[in-house]
Amino acid sequence: MADLPVGSDEIAIGIDLGTSNSCVAVCRNGRPEVLANTYGEPISASCVAFREEGSIVVGNAAKAQVVHDPKHTVSSAKRLIGRYFFSEEVKKARSVCSYQIVEGPNHGVRIQIREDTFSVPELSAMVLREMKKIAEARLGQPVSKAVITVPAYFNDSQRQATRDAGRVAGLEVMRLLNEPTAAALSYGFGKGLRQKVAVYDLGGGTFDISVLEIGKDVFEVLSTCGDTYLGGDDFDDRLLDLLADEFLAEENINLRNDIFALEKLKVAAEDAKKGLSVDDEVDIRIPDIITAEDGRSISLERCLSRTEYAPLVMDLIQRTFKVCDEAIQQANLTVRDLDGVILVGGPTRLPLIRDAVRDYFQQDARGDVDPDQVVALGAAIHAASLVSPGGDQESFLLDVTPLSLRIGVAGGLAETILERNTPVPIEQTRTFTTVRDFQRSVKIRVYQGESRRAEDNELLGEFEFSGFKRARRGEVRIDVSFEINSDGIVNVTARDPDTGQKASTRITLSSGLTEEEIQRIMERNQSESLDADGQPAATETAEGPQAEAASEDLLDVLPEELPDDLLDESDLMGTGAAAEIVPDDLDLLDDVNAQTGSNLPVERKADAAEDVIDESDLFEAPGSMLRDPDEEPKS
Amino acid sequence: MAALEAAEIRALDRILDELDYYEVLEIRRGAPGSAIRAAYHKASRLYHPDVNRGLDADLREPVERIAKRVTEAYAVLRDARRRRIYDERLAEQSGVARMPLAEAEAEAGRKSQAERGGRTPNGRRYFTLATSDLARGDLVAAERNLRTAVTFEPDNAVFKSRLEEVQRRADAARRSR
């Protein structure tokens, strides 16, 4: 089966790590193909089941278990990846998920399964490892390199966490690729098109829209926008609510209070949605969904038509078009300029969505694209071009950053360094100076988001720079570089321009794993997989040697990507203000001061207050090229 | 694709900070937008990290630096407003090579803000008059006042496009009568 191109012993796979389902593909001899699992299924559920006896099952078999053991079956973990425990999305997940979501260190998210707690990247890694195994079984050879796709609108924390998951799974993640970009690549690959296309990607948990210009061999993303709180799961929740409310009205029993009934409802809601993609009407039947207090077993039966379903979800669909408006406007285009629309994600099979998309874009979506597989196929094409560049059908991707990169300034404001939809890779340098005599260190908070108010954006981390010369205020210059690489990952470094010496950088991690934790998990996995003999299919392949190989690879990347002192957890949410430039926009400043900290957890609140009071850390940028860009000429 | 020569990379990296954005993309200063895009694609094809994965480790850093500068040049020059600000900088000051994107954007934003209302007192005055004419539905007066506003600020794109729009509407109104 392993008919590799002559002269190449490397193979790299593309993995679409989805919220609900995942898919793996490979591109050989210029032909991309999906690799099906042992049951011949092209897509596998992104679901992990922890069995009583200690074994772990991943994929469609795990999903089948969810109604029997909802507490120990994890699905849709991607909704939690790279998020703070206190975020809205995690709150929402805690209310709808039957498995236990607990708070970990650094305000991170952990999932409690019996006595064990798992980080979200670990769970994603289990899904990734399963996809790797499917590929190895189909290809008949070990696989260690992969391109993994992420929603275009994922922020830095979510991307870092996905990368961590890949490493934990024993994969060398060559690139993180944005899902819509991958879809466009698969659609336009080798066709020699010249088109402007929109990719409408409604997945299980996220919505992305990207506008691309496809040239002869260049795929240039013009803009991307998204909503990471909107996906197929929300459609299912709406139907679930309807069914549960009706049941409550009729039987006076709240099915939401019973996790078994709740899981059955979720499955039924998803099945009904899928059914309505094909038929005008579906029968929802859940026999013995619950036992009443009098011991009577009650079933749920109902017929649902497309006409009844439409009003439940219409507002969700309309929400996607608001995002589309934004993306098309950011691309400097109108709907009429678009030559094609590509639909991605299972929910886009719904005729309701197809019709709405046709109305909005004033054209039919491309029919020759499988919405469940197109992303993995694109990832595989890109993976192949990365292992053997210069191929005759090579396609070249130019992507953008989905979110504006900002730094915290006095008064709880966040100033833009790089605007959203700026092409990547890119770097911007700002020069700062100290404001106190013999100041030892400076701190910068880095955010992603579209608000001028710091707290409305996502805090990526806090960077501290020290080790520069002892000098009076204003005499020290520090060049700080903000880089976004082609994975969409943010790197911040500082340099003393006089000596050329790199100042030490300390990043306080956001919601991700520390390097230590990653190593610990990898070691644990390694030892587990070594004594995993005789375990069920899920842990069957020989992973020991590969995991080892992967960790050797890691040593190469480590120093560059993750400075040693990054390990210091204690620094998170440290004291000291992350402020440097004093904005002169005093009205806005007052306004923000009045409201500072309203949504932050306790530790951060205290900190945010310091931003305002403690000016001792303030430092400003000298020189004409580095003045505050928001500075208004006073008239 | 021809592999990059090590010496070539090092030489370009060394002088990178002295090159203005046009030189980075290897285009002339008056080049049209389509040429900027083509140059960006061409340069990215050479320097983008994706095509240089096989490069020696010590060359990867300089190549990445060049790739990032190419993107930066494109991010400023592809936007007509930012490009105008950058061009002015180039003409005014010697030794200007880079311009922070946020600064280019903020300045471009200020400029268009100013254009929207007018830069000269007379321009502002007649443009405001035209706006209230339009609110009343008096196309003839609006056209006259806009024409006057344009004579004070002949290069104000906002004034000009508003005038064209009013002229179109006035023509249509005349025809239908």
Image: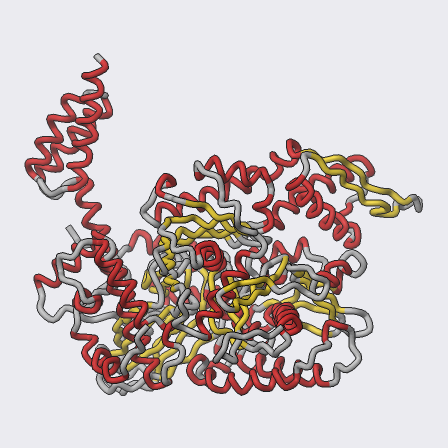
Quarter placement of the N terminus of chain B: bottom left
Q: Residue furthest left?
A: B151
Q: Residue at x 48, y 72 (%)?
A: A573
Point out residue B73 in the picture as x, y percentages from the top left corner: 24, 64
Q: Residue furthest right?
A: A295
Establish if B154 lies above or below A170: above
Q: Is residue B130 left or right of residue A299?
A: left
Point out residue A143 in the picture as x, y percentages from the top left corner: 58, 76
Q: Quadrant of residue A475?
A: bottom left
Q: Residue at x 78, y 77 (%)?
A: A535
Q: Can residue B66 be seen at all in this image of the molecule?
A: yes
Quarter placement of the C terminus of chain B: top left
Q: Can residue A110 be seen at all in this image of the molecule?
A: no
Q: Residue at x 18, y 21 (%)?
A: B171
Q: Nearer the viewer, residue A371 or A11?
A: A11
Establish if A426 lies above or below B38: below
Q: Residue at x 15, y 36 (%)?
A: B160
Q: Is residue A5 left or right of residue B101?
A: right
- Number of callouts: 0
Q: Nearer the viewer, residue B113 or A212?
A: A212
Q: Residue furthest top?
A: B177
Point out residue A227 in the picture as x, y percentages from the top left corner: 49, 51
Q: Quadrant of residue B170?
A: top left
Point out residue B150 in the picture as x, y percentages from the top left corner: 10, 36
Establish if B175 lies above or below A251: above
Q: Nearer the viewer, residue A326 or A255?
A: A326
Q: Quadrant of residue B76?
A: bottom left
